[in-house]
Image (cartoon, rainbow, N blue to C red):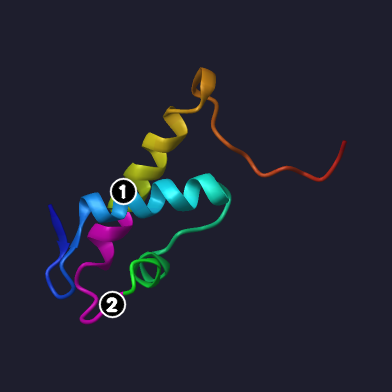
Amino acid sequence: MILCSCTRLTSSQLRDMLDIRYQEDPYRLVTPGRLFAMTGRKMQCGRCAKLVNEAITMEIQRLQQALPNNRTLTPQSGKD
């Protein structure tokens, strides 16, 4: 599915980039702007931002469900 008609960003490209980013650092915030930069694009008109943000949220939820025992990641407090 095309998420951004200006840059032809697709849902499969979003999924691929988030899979990579999530493996590198699951705590790093991914915004539509960062996603566009990761794919070598620049957001143009911005009408897709809400849809891309929703797709990012759904994809992060999918990745978290793939964790063993359906654990969700929470930032570490730094206390041992």
Q: Residue 15, labelled with which disc?
A: 1
- Residue underneath mark 2: 43
Is residue 47 within the magenta segment?
Answer: yes
* Residue 63 figure quarter: top left
Magenta: main secondary structure: loop
Q: Position of residue 9 (x, y in %)?
A: 21, 64
Q: Is residue 2 left or right of residue 18?
A: left
The residue furthest right is 80
Local packing at callout 1 (Cα closer than 10 Å; few below 14, some 14-19, many 20+) is: some
- Residue with the most extreme top position: 69
Q: Which residues are magenta?
A: 41-53
Magenta highlight on residue 27: no
Query: Looking at numbered disc 1 in the image, what kind of residue is underneath it?
Result: Arg
61 in relation to 71, above or below = below
Q: Residue placed at 33% from the left, 50% from the top?
A: 16
Q: Left or right: 27 with respect to 6?
A: right
Of labels 1 and 2, the one closer to you: 1
Residue 34: quarter of image: bottom left
Q: What secondary structure is marked by label 1?
A: helix
Q: Residue at x 23, y 81 (%)?
A: 44
Q: Provide the secondary structure element on which disc 2 rests.
A: loop
> In front here: 53 or 62?
62
Q: Position of residue 7 (x, y in %)?
A: 18, 73
The kind of residue on which mark 2 rests is: Met
